Amino acid sequence: MELKLPHFDSVFSIDCVIFGFEAGELKVLLIERNEDPFKDWLALPGYIVGQDESVDHAAERILYELTGLRDVSIRQFHTFGEVNRHPQGRVITVGYFALIRINGQKELEPVTHFARKAFWHPVNELPTLAFDHTEIFKRAYKKMRTKLNYEPIAFDLLPEKFTLTQLQLLYEAVLNKKLDKRNFRKKMLSYGFLKELAEKQKGVSYRAAKLYKFDRRKYAKIFQNELGS
Amino acid sequence: MELKLPHFDSVFSIDCVIFGFEAGELKVLLIERNEDPFKDWLALPGYIVGQDESVDHAAERILYELTGLRDVSIRQFHTFGEVNRHPQGRVITVGYFALIRINGQKELEPVTHFARKAFWHPVNELPTLAFDHTEIFKRAYKKMRTKLNYEPIAFDLLPEKFTLTQLQLLYEAVLNKKLDKRNFRKKMLSYGFLKELAEKQKGVSYRAAKLYKFDRRKYAKIFQNELGS
DNA sequence: AATTTAATGTGTAATTTATACACACTATCT
DNA sequence: AGATAGTGTGTATAAATTACACATTAAATT
């Protein structure tokens, strides 16, 4: 379709801030760039939106291409529209963030030519990133911490079956503060969307903890009123 | 600067959802379009982002051009990136919302050629809007209601000096529910950012209420810790 | 001057929610 | 059998939220 509106040459991209949780630490997915500008720099995975795909779709596609993951809850958090973000011209980028399960054996092979590798990096002591990606990351992290307090996003980071201690460690890592064990458990269980399994933790050299599962259906039922309209 | 990145013809615009409060009702600023597509339709004020301005700047500029207002707290809330939003080609738009004081005598003369007039319309019983503007509006309204609960945005809608009853009526109009007078006042005053003035309401035929003022400096002081990092 | 009108301004008790805090239990390992 | 290491649980206190009603005031009316 021919474009009849006044416009100027511009590029439209998305950048993803993908969080994972591993070894008790919150991590973010970075790539090593293989192209100018910022060749060899570390950056957030991001790419240009295609002509015939929605921005949301582009975000899902790029996440898939970089991680092989589908059906991840991915959310827009901010659009970065400063004039000089990109040294080669006007690039406006929509920031998305997602939380995913780091599967020990999961390959992180970039399928895009412009990245040399993709890897998890702890969110603390983050290196300098290409473009304004440090700023983008910070904004996503802040949003994510806020969201953790009122949406069940933590479960996206954990294995399907988890113990309450694992859940608490995750909250502590993200919020960066210690929580009281009894109060934490009381509150989590009071929501009613955690399903206690018959199963127990295996392979630990101490008393095995009960495993729980996040029950999305119950969650939806409980919170449908509040989220409605 | 020449653009060396792969790209396609696209347009980048912003749309504003501008809320006001008048006669006890929440209103939104609409324009009547004077250009195709959707000529003669009602729409949200919006326009194309300039080449050498940031998206945030474009939003401020467009708001100014449409309302003559400056220094308004204007905030991005979502980017709309569906492929077929616009019948003439790919247009990605960033939605902004703002809350402003409706000044009885304030002129709403569009300075852009593409609008015939601009006017306030109650948010309830909103007419069908051009493009996907109904969806954009709904999203802004929802966000605004959410924000009202944890940010002092209500004061942008009221005159500088206001009574607690006026403040409460505003909350009731936005949240669409009745609030308890005593509890509302207790809570508002407990925050400590409302400054009681010596002055009283004038020109009413009943006991005049005390006037209050929102003290931005106190607010910033009180909440600097929570917002930090 | 007295009365009516219409909205302001205020307190307390009951309930719910959040916080602080410590130890017995259990599975595994030696 | 005992040591180890982490699990699982309850209660008392403080803080925040909710429910609820009437005397006060300024102007307008008689």
Image (cartoon, coloured by chain):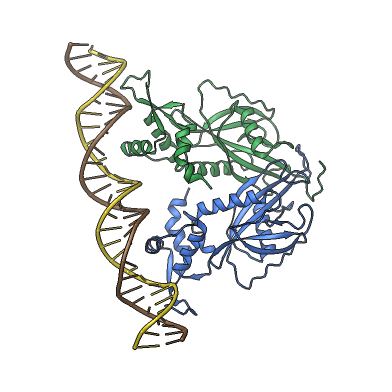
Chain colours: A blue, B green, C brown, D yellow
Q: Nearer the viewer, residue A158 or B94?
A: A158
A58, above or below B35, in the image: below
**In which quadrant of the rendered view does residue B134 lie?**
top right
Q: Is D3 left or right of B48, judged from the image as shown? A: left
Disc tally is 0
Residue C13: x percent and y percent? 20, 45
In the picture, measured across the screen, residue B41 lies left or right of residue B194, that is right
Residue A46, x across and y down, in percent: 69, 55
The quarter of the rendered structure image containing the N terminus of chain B is top right
Q: Is residue B152 visible?
A: no
Please state the horizontal and vertical placement of residue A129, each as a whole percent of the image: 68, 53
Q: Residue B107, position in %: x, y?
A: 57, 22
Specify the quadrant of the image occupied by residue B67: top right
Decide: is A124 above or below B26: below
Residue A200 falls in which quadrant of the image? bottom left
Query: Image point 67% across, 70% down: which residue?
Result: A107
Q: Determine whether, in the image, residue A112 is placed left or right of residue A77.
A: right
Residue B52 appears in the figure: yes
Question: Image check: B144 left or right of B129?
Answer: left
In front: B75, or B191? B191
Q: Which residue is drawn at 44% across and 67% down?
A: A164
